[in-house]
Amino acid sequence: MAVQIRPSGAACGAEVAGVDMHADLPAADIAALEQALLDHGVLVFRDQPLTPHALASFSARFGPLQPHVQRAYQHPDVPEIVVMTNRKADGTFDEAGARRGAIENTRDGWHSDLSYDPVPAKATLLHAQALPGSGGNTCFTNARRAFADLPLDIKQRVIGRTAAFTYGGHQRNQSAAKAASALDASGKATSQAEHPVINAHVATGEPAIYVNPLITTAILEVDHADSEALLETLFDALDRPAYRFEHEWRLGDTLMWDNRGGIMHTGRLDYPRDQLRQFIRTTVSGAAIEPYRPD
């Protein structure tokens, strides 16, 4: 069966059919999925339960995998897998774990994975292992469209600027600070970087907002007041419902999304806290983020 891509009809996202995630895929199928990722930003694979080894094997078809900076949640048998869970080993609610990529309001949660790393991720793959009875959706926003619709004067003020991205020791976003509290000393020291405010996608060259409310702390070339005003304008733009795709999970789902600029995501922290929400995740290594330079 040939690879089939079914667009979501929203601002991003598509469902994939015709792919056996346990099988060795031909090069043509991998190429089709890579192109679909560029076209839609988010891919949904349904009804294929995966072990940690199977998820790591499938993910590695898109590039080298890297362990996550959150070593406390690293899978004991598959180091390329990080466990995304809201439960501690004793079964109590894990506030830091629950806030890793999830928040009560989307406005303050948008981010692209590893934007705090000098070389951010190419892609993330996330597979559902346990789901609460309600809530806990994962939301995506199209940061290319958000940039395209900015007023010209705002575009002129942010193109060419650089921003600071910090995970460990973050003060601007308290939810991020809580999630980062589980980092060890090495993770806190290394989870910071500088990237363009507006980037050009490494594969397509398309511009997008790259600063994000979860990780970005400041725009560097302007004073504090200007930095705050510009960031708030950009973060409001990202949160417009018109740019959004929201995924309602079911067991056996895997999501794959692009982190190279153009797509941001956040989980919803709106589910019953006495219920388990757990995923396994891989990160495909990426390349340096390039600034957008208009002709």
Image (cartoon, rainbow, N blue to C red):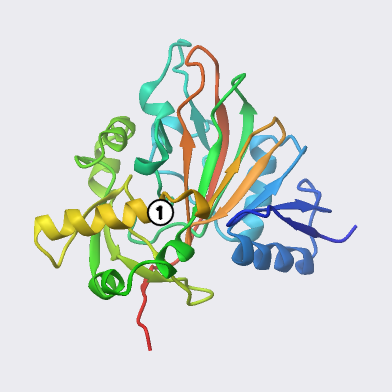
Which amino acid type is marked by label 1?
Answer: Leu
Q: Nearer the viewer, residue 6 or 258?
A: 6
**Furthest-bottom residue in view?**
295
**How many numbered marks have been drawn onto this rendered protein structure?**
1
Q: Quadrant of the N terminus?
A: bottom right
Percent position of residue 15, x then y:
72, 51
Name the residue at 64% across, 28% down: 129
Q: Quadrant of the C terminus?
A: bottom left
Q: Nearer the viewer, residue 147 or 278?
A: 147
Q: Which quadrant would residue 130 be assigned to in this image?
A: top right
Percent position of residue 292, x then y:
37, 76
- Decide: is 29 above or below 153: above
Percent position of residue 95, x then y:
37, 22
Q: Nearer the viewer, residue 227 or 86?
A: 227
Percent position of residue 127, x then y:
63, 38
- Decide: is 214 above or below 93: below
For label 1, the residue is: 238
- Decide: is 128 above or below 207: above
Name the residue at 34% across, 33% down: 179
Name the residue at 47% across, 71% down: 201
Is 104 situated left or right of 167 in this image? right
Name the residue at 30% across, 42% down: 187
